[in-house]
Image: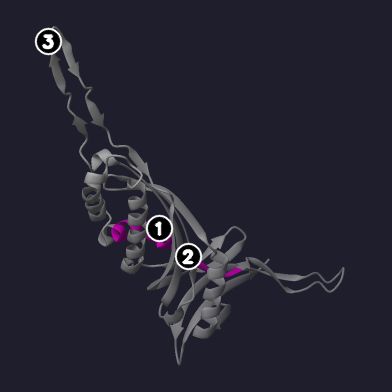
Amino acid sequence: MSELEIAVDEAQAALLVARGQTMLGTQSRSGTSSLGPFDANWSASASITGGSVDLRAPDIIRLANVNFNFSLGLGLSFDLSDILPDFCIPQVCIPIPFLPDLCTPEVCINWPTITLPTINHSGMVTFTSDFRLNATADGSDWVADIEIVDIPNLQLDAISTAIVAAIMGAVALALSTIPFIGPFLALATAAIGAIFAVSAITGWLGPILSLFLSGLTFELYRAPQVQTVIPAGGAFDPAVQIRITSLGASVVSSDEDELLLAADIAPV
């Protein structure tokens, strides 16, 4: 049996989780990726809040209906020539007796690269996942935290639908400013719409947001390894200190489920 034990019920464990979420704060990521012929630069931030706590022996805290709040900035560019064929207006020559033919120049249309203005979107999804308890030494402290076991499946189709609408609006505005595209506008819009289907955006967005969940950890408890148990009573009555030599974290079940911290101690 450990020499020092601290136990909290699910209500108190929920307070520890909420505190850990607050300490974690808002995390940020950025990167580049591709969507078919499109180049995408993205930046994203996310925070985790809320959720109900279910303690499960021997070492699992299940968090249900956690709020995953995120903001996404998406910059897209694409070469219109990858979607529409380039074309040339052929040269036309008129023969003139005794003189060189009078010819019009050949005019070729090379479609430009389109850069869309940054598309910003904020949203929230909920998830449920299991977190495993850990207790480790961190420098001169002992730390108890929980780390996500499996990355949950995020339901993103509704969010992807909104992003697709924003992308297609930006594409339509950008195409409307390009000369000579009138006869090809429907073709270009249909081709781009096929690339930016809801399923394609969901498949692209999921891995980006999963970066925030991979290895997600909340700190529940931190304490110095050396602690004063009796303060100094004077010059000849020094403080009494102990050292926590080991710390364990688990979930125990009796008449109710409890989160248990168990420590072994030694005099300093």
Q: Quadrant of the C terminus?
A: bottom right
Above or below residue 57? Residue 147 is above
Secondary structure beneath disc 3? loop
Secondary structure beneath disc 1? helix
Q: Residue furthest right?
A: 235
Q: Write the residue at 49% across / 76% down.
A: 50
Q: Which residue is mark 3?
A: 97
Q: Which mark is residue 69?
A: none
Q: Amino acid at mark 1?
A: Leu
Q: Which residue is mark 1?
A: 211
Q: Which residue is mark 2?
A: 217
Q: Compare marks 3 and 1 and give the one earlier in the sequence.
A: 3
Question: Which of label 3 and label 2 is nearer to you?
Answer: 3
Q: Magenta stretch: residue 206 in it?
A: yes
Q: Magenta stretch: residue 120 in it?
A: no
* Mark 3 burial class by Cα count in 10 Å: few <14, some 14-19, many 20+: few
Question: In the rendering, at what x and y percent does residue 142 appear?
Answer: 58, 65
Question: In the rendering, at what x and y percent does residue 101 appear?
Answer: 16, 14
Q: Write the residue at 61% across / 71% down.
A: 265
The CA span between labels 3 and 2 is 86 Å
- Camera sees residue 206: no
Q: Amino acid at mark 2?
A: Thr
Secondary structure beneath disc 2? strand
